[in-house]
Every structure is written in structure tokens, then in C-alpha cells.
Image (tube, helix red, strand yellow):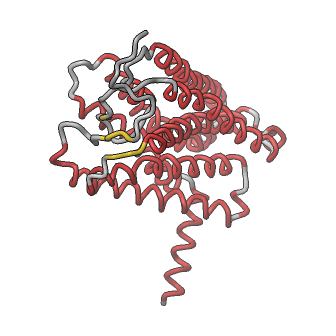
């Protein structure tokens, strides 16, 4: 395969365009993005603080929630500050190494979040289907191993993305019509064949598909167990413990599904719609997750309320 003379293997930098077609609105788009980031930071740090200081929350369900909050902080911080730099200060340049680093962390945190949602589904399955064995099945050691597995799986599947990009030669076009660096967005700038990148990308997506199927199977068993409970009150109580998790699952997978569908089948959809959908699934879940769990989880809601009331009493 011949490589054009104007090809660079490792260009010094790329240019992130932001949201093509909406350049004139970039300044205004930045404000809701900034608000989302502030809510994500405050909400997830609050979740982590409450779980740390309240010994009653040192349980598997809340350990998984702490993992989710940590991942959300990482995912939002890996994307939104650079977006705001593009929207407000026209800081579109990103050096090659920084672009690869951002790509690595975005894909890593996305896979980790999916795995933690699966772990939380397993937690709910054990709590409802095997309540008497809950404390013996989900010990601190098991939770730690699950957390390690979440991290290791993500790293193992994402590291090849870096090497698949490093092997590609890049032509003159170093412009990425996006707000952040992601694997296929970088691969498409190459002069060489990206067939391997496409195949491996689909293999990596299979991780998310596996997680969705496993979560669905968990809830089939959960619903089967719930509807066999003797009383209506017991059924409602069991379902209420899953409510927050179901909403979080929908908040994470729905934008990702729409983004995937528009990329594959929405050839007539404007490019800015593609970019906005791709942004939704990396910025919305980190904002929504702490809000959903803060409002719907009684233990966290009560603890936050208590802290706020104590602060008000001290100010008086």
C-alpha cells in the first residue's frame, strides 16, 4: 500500500471543531454544558462524602454507587473542560498525545460505567432473590474484586485503541468535526485502511451489549421473584429499591443507543445532531446519576438533609 507524500505518522496536533453547523451558538451552548459540569461535580462529590462519613452506608450497594460517582467525575472531567475551552475561548487545538489520552479515558470510563451498572444489577438481584445470603455473597472482598474486574476489563479492551491509532498514518486533514477525541473519529482521518479499527470497535461495543443483556436477565429474575411475593406492599418495597437503578440505566444507555443508531442509519440526519447525541451520553449521566440517587435513595437523601440542617443551625 502506497502512502502519500503529505502523510504524517504522528501529527503534532488536531483541531476539534466543536459542533459543526452550530459554531455561532457555541458561546450559548457552553452555559448549559458548564451548568451540567457543576452539577456533576457537586452531586458526585456529595455522594462520595456522604458514603464516606456515614458508616451505615458502608454496604455493597453504596460501594457500587461510590464507584459510579468516581467514574462519573472522571468521565465529565475528561470531556467538558475541553468542550468549554472550544465553546468559549476557541481553544480548538489539541496535541496528538493529549488527544490519545482523552480518547483512552473517555472509552475507559464508558466501559467502566457500563460494568458498574451491571454490578449494581447483580447487587439488586442478590438482595431481592437471595436476601438471606446477601451479606455472605457480597462481602467486602467480593465487592473489591468486582471493582478491580471493572477496571481491568476496561483497560484491557481500551489499550488496543491507542495502538490501533498509533499504527495509522495521517494525511493533511487533521480536523476532527467533534467536541472530543474518540477512536473512530481519529481513525477516519487516516490515509490507510481502518478495517481493523472498525472490527475491533465493534468487538468493544459487544462489551456494552453483553452488559445490557446481563442486566436485562437480572431484572427478569428480579421481577419473577417480586411478583411471587405474598403482599402488595412487599412487592412495591422491592420494586422501589430498583427504581433508581433502572432510571440510571436508561439515562446511560438510551443516548448511547440513539447515537449509535443515527451513526449507522441516519445518513440524512444533520451532523450537529450526531455530535449533540454523542455529547449527551458522556455528559448527561454524570449529572443525572447523583441527582437520581440523592433524591430517590432515602439513606442518602436523609443524610444530605441532615448535613444541610446542621449547617443552617451553625449559621444561626
Residue 111 makes an appearance in the image: yes
Which of 126 and 7 lies nearest the eye of the viewer? 7
| Vertical position of residue 31 compared to residue 4: above or below | below
Location of the N terminus by quadrant is: top left
Q: Residue furthest top?
A: 1
Which of 182 and 37 lies nearest the eye of the viewer? 182
From the viewer's perspective, is 242 left or right of 286? right
Residue displayed at 56% across by 47% down: 71
Residue 246 makes an appearance in the image: no
Which of 86 and 311 lies nearest the eye of the viewer? 86
Q: Which residue lies furthest to the left in this view?
A: 24
Q: Position of residue 83 (x, y in %)?
A: 34, 49
Q: Position of residue 51 (x, y in %)?
A: 65, 60
From the viewer's perspective, is 64 left or right of 308? right
Q: How many labels does the image show?
A: 0
Q: Residue furthest front?
A: 5
Q: Where is residue 255 in the image (x, y as percent from the top left)?
A: 39, 33
| Vertical position of residue 46 compared to residue 8: above or below | below
Q: Where is residue 276 in the image (x, y as percent from the top left)?
A: 30, 37
Q: For residue 278, which quarter of the picture?
A: top left
Which of 166 and 140 lies nearest the eye of the viewer? 166
Q: For residue 19, which quarter of the picture?
A: top left
Q: Residue furthest right?
A: 136
Residue displayed at 36% across by 39% down: 14
Residue displayed at 34% across by 46% down: 93
Amino acid at each position: 500500500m502506497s502512502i502519500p507524500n503529505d502523510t504524517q505518522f504522528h501529527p503534532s496536533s488536531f483541531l476539534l471543531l466543536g459542533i459543526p453547523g452550530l459554531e455561532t451558538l457555541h458561546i450559548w451552548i457552553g452555559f448549559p454544558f458548564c451548568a451540567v459540569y457543576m452539577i456533576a461535580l457537586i452531586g458526585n462529590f456529595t455522594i462520595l462524602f456522604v458514603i464516606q462519613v456515614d458508616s451505615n452506608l458502608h454496604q455493597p450497594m453504596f460501594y457500587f454507587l461510590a464507584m459510579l460517582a468516581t467514574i462519573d467525575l472522571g468521565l465529565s472531567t475528561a470531556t467538558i473542560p475541553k468542550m468549554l475551552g472550544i465553546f468559549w475561548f476557541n481553544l480548538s487545538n489539541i496535541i496528538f498525545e493529549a488527544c490519545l489520552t482523552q480518547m483512552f479515558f473517555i472509552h475507559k470510563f464508558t466501559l467502566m460505567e457500563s460494568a458498574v451498572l451491571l454490578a449494581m444489577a447483580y447487587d439488586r438481584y442478590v438482595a431481592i432473590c437471595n436476601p438471606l445470603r446477601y451479606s455472605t455473597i457480597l462481602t467486602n472482598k467480593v465487592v473489591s474484586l468486582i471493582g478491580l474486574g471493572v477496571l481491568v476489563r476496561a483497560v484491557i479492551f481500551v489499550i488496543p485503541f491507542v495502538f490501533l491509532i498509533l499504527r495509522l498514518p495521517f494525511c493533511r486533514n487533521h480536523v476532527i468535526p467533534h467536541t472530543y477525541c474518540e477512536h473512530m473519529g481519529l481513525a477516519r482521518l487516516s490515509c490507510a485502511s481502518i478495517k481493523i479499527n472498525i472490527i475491533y470497535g465493534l468487538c468493544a461495543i459487544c462489551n456494552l451489549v453483553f452488559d445490557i443483556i446481563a442486566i436485562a436477565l437480572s431484572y427478569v429474575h428480579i421481577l419473577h421473584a417480586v411478583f411471587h411475593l405474598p403482599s402488595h406492599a412487599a412487592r412495591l418495597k422491592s420494586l422501589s429499591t430498583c427504581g433508581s437503578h433502572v432510571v440510571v440505566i436508561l439515562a446511560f444507555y438510551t443516548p448511547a443507543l440513539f447515537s449509535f443508531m443515527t451513526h449507522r442509519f441516519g445518513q440524512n440526519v444533520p451532523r450537529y445532531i450526531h455530535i449533540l447525541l454523542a455529547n449527551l451520553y458522556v455528559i448527561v449521566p454524570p449529572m443525572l446519576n447523583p441527582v437520581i440517587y440523592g433524591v430517590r435513595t432515602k439513606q442518602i437523601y436523609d443524610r444530605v438533609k441532615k448535613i444541610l440542617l446542621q449547617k443552617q443551625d451553625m449559621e444561626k
